[in-house]
Amino acid sequence: MSGPLRTDPRIWRQAASVVLAAGWKGPGAAASSLPPAEGFRVLLLQRSSSQAFLPGAHVFPGGVLDRADLSADWLPIFAPHHKPPRFGLGPAPAQTATFPVVPISRPGAADGEAAALPDDVALRICAIREAFEEAGVLLLLPRGARHVPESQGSAPEFACALEPPPDVSAWRTRVRGDARHFLDLCAHLDCTPNIWALHAWSGWLTPFIGEKLRRFDTSFFLCCLSEPPPIQIDLAEVVNCRWSSPSEATESFLSKEIWLAHPQFYEIRRLENFASLSDLHKFCLEHALEGSERWLPINCVTADGMMIQLYPGDELYLEDSDFLEKVLSTEKKTEEIMKEGQKFHRLVHHHSHYYSIHVTVQSKGKHIYPKNYVVNKSHL
Ligand SMILES: Nc1ncnc2c1ncn2[C@@H]1O[C@H](COP(=O)(O)O)[C@@H](OP(=O)(O)O)[C@H]1O
Ligand SMILES: CCC(=O)SCCNC(=O)CCNC(=O)[C@H](O)C(C)(C)COP(=O)(O)O
Ligand SMILES: [Mg+2]
């Protein structure tokens, strides 16, 4: 049985995050102790300890969709580059996963109101605005600049962040106060949000943790930048930042230097599959027309007090809405469950700084899953 979640629609928020992956030639690029898949770093921002959701966690830039991200006022800003309905993003990706249906209404939209921008455009604008608010990164394209990723006969080009204008701090304060000012900033700079540099990557729904707790339907995008732009954290919502390779981020998590929530850990492990920024970029361009899957993880608490997080494709994952608003529990211990299973797509939460990932199934689409990740018992 599958169907809509019965949860209160006010619990859910639409959100967008962007994984900024940048070419890395700085210190450590040639460090011999690191595996070869280290030609790029991703930006991680540390959330303030006073945040209500995931306090202190390291996350990718992102946040909640604002009604300003959906405004028809964006049409003239996009006009020099592309027009509705698809704004140059190519055909709308087919809806691959219909489960689960989550009752989310667009911010500020009246029922039945036609949207000026498609969701995948508005969510990209949201992710770009959040990257500016939280990290000071301007993923904008000046009028006249080319956004087509491939130049004939040469390798696809990576994106570049715009150099911030001298009055950037004042603009940032304004945008953080009211998201509509992001549109004013783009008009002032005669630039357009570079939605074409953001590739659909994945989608994560917050699993059920408790009644009345807020939940997010977050679209993750990936953006390949030729080099890391300067970062100016806002020192409010975000208190620290770092550029880490996937293996560095994993090591920092294991050594308790940073804390990662499950989706970020999964995505970092997934990125470990790519040997270079070029490989990652090529994969994004090839994968573009497929869109991304959106997963609702199901948490299952085991008899030894650990938690197994199940993803679609795992033999214990149930597309049954009855199971989606409660945490599953079992009388069995983690080891027992792991011994008796075969089709795995799951993360085992051993403790707050040790998660293992078990994948024995193939991705249904063309996306790539992380490799198995199990740390030596001496780490525990
Ligand atoms: N100085 C600060 N310290 C901690 N959290 C802050 C903050 N300024 C803003 N925030 C919180 O950051 C969140 C906004 O995130 P985003 O813009 O990325 O969606 C809001 O959380 P709430 O939604 O819990 O109010 C907001 O309250
Ligand atoms: C251990 C508890 C968990 O892991 S709950 C899962 C948390 N992740 C999500 O809910 C989906 C992924 N989305 C994000 O991580 C986003 O960064 C965001 C939704 C936390 C952004 O929120 P913001 O407070 O910045 O609006
Ligand atoms: Mg945020």
Image (spheres, grey):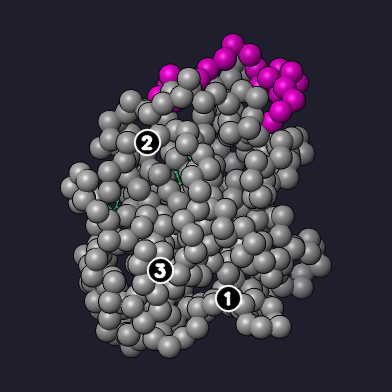
Q: Considering the numbered disc 1 on the image, is that residue within a helix, a strand or a loop?
A: loop
The amino acid type found where label 3 is placed reads Phe
Q: Considering the numbered disc 3 on the image, is that residue within a helix, a strand or a loop?
A: loop
Q: Residues within 10 Å of mark 2 (few under 14, many from 20)?
A: some
Q: Residues within 10 Å of mark 1 (few under 14, many from 20)?
A: some
In the image, taking residue 177 as reference, residue 33 lies left or right, namely right
The amino acid type found where label 2 is placed reads Val
Q: Residue at x 77, y 39 (%)?
A: 376
Position in image of residue 220 (x %, y %): 49, 54
Q: Nearer the viewer, residue 371 or 242?
A: 371
Q: Residue at x 61, y 62 (%)?
A: 284
Position in image of residue 218 (x %, y %): 43, 48
Q: Residue at x 24, y 57 (%)?
A: 67
* 197 to 332, vertically: above or below: below
- Judging by the rendered image, the residue that carries numbered circle 3 is 87
Q: Residues within 10 Å of mark 3 (few under 14, many from 20)?
A: some
In the image, taking residue 328 as reference, residue 11 lies left or right, namely left
Which segment is the magenta one?
A: 322-344
- The answer to if 170 sits in the magenta stretch is no
Whether residue 242 is visible, yes or no, is no
